Amino acid sequence: AEVLSRQTIAAPNPGDLGPFTVKRLCYGSGTDKQRPEYAKNAAIKTKTVDVTPFATVPAARAKQRKKFWGFDLKKAPINGRVWYPDGTGPFALVLIVHGNHNWQEFSDPGYEYLGELLASRGFILASVDENFINGLSGENDGRAWLLLKHLEAWKKFNETEGGPFYGRVDMTNVAVMGHSRGGEAAAVAAAFNRLKYYPEDFKQEFDFNFDIKAVVALAPVDGQYKPTGRFTPLENVNYLLMHGSHDEDVSTAMGLRQYERLRFTDGQPWFKAVF
């Protein structure tokens, strides 16, 4: 028998920093009550969006949450922390979104280690702020829709002359990543991306169609949101599923269900992998 722990791979360590110097900035609404990096210190100002068709705050908690945030979900911010290479690009874009947590404790700074690594290796990584819909239920469609609204913002960043990302974003190479509820939201976003309408309400029209090439799910939930009562179908996208042994909340590898549902139907060399 082979003892695998003694085996080595003759390849560079993927955890080592790459050749690019890493730069950082935040974009946001410009009026965030709790975090100046999304308010007066935001390098790029973004417009708010109405996420209420996809996420609902119970009436009993609405006043408390609005007092804390200074806004309700009709004016949800597009806030993100960005790590990016110091270079001309264009660079592939990665959006990552946190999972559920105490809505008064902010999860989006936690991906700094990953932002530093990927940016040093030639990727733009944005950690998406969705803390304001934490603590709700049945809101993963809202998390997914917000990811796509961030991609709309990134398209604009890439097209804005004089801006820090003008012509530097490869919008033909996009990945969406997430942990826990965010892991399911990444897959739902990839599914919504190709739809013309929101499955639960055809009055909500979709017009996204971004070049999402990859979905990465870290200990995702599965089935918190079910479009028209079905588990989310997914096809023709690269899919990486990772599930550790010490996740606090998701005790079983639920993401295997999404992994099994993923289908490749267009003859292109997509792949899926699970660790």
Image: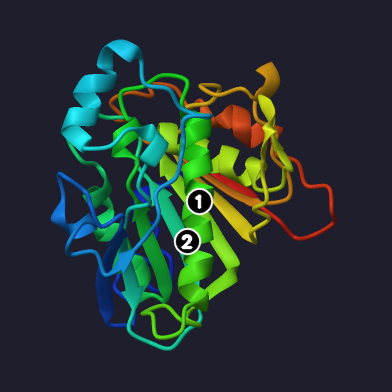
In the image, 169 versus 262, the foreground residue is 169
Give the residue at the far top of this rendering: 60
Task: Determine which residue is flagged by label 2.
Answer: 153
- Residue 42 to residue 141: above or below: below
- Disc number for residue 123: none
- Residue 125: name its quadrant: bottom left
Residue beneath disc 1: 149
Label 2 crowding class (10 Å Cα cut-off): few <14, some 14-19, many 20+? some
Mark 1, Cα crowd under 10 Å, few <14 / some 14-19 / many 20+, is: some
In x, y percent, where is residue 247? 31, 30
Q: Amino acid at mark 1?
A: Lys
Mark 1 element type = helix
Query: What is the three-letter code of the residue carrying label 2?
Result: Ala
The secondary element bearing badge 2 is classed as helix
**Residue lying at 63% horizontally and 48% vertically, measured from the top left:** 272
Report the side of 136 relative to 202 (left or right). left
Horizontal and vertical percent position of residue 75: 37, 41
Task: Pick whichever, 75 or 172, lies toward us.
Answer: 75
| Contact? badges 2 and 1 (CB < 8 Å) | yes
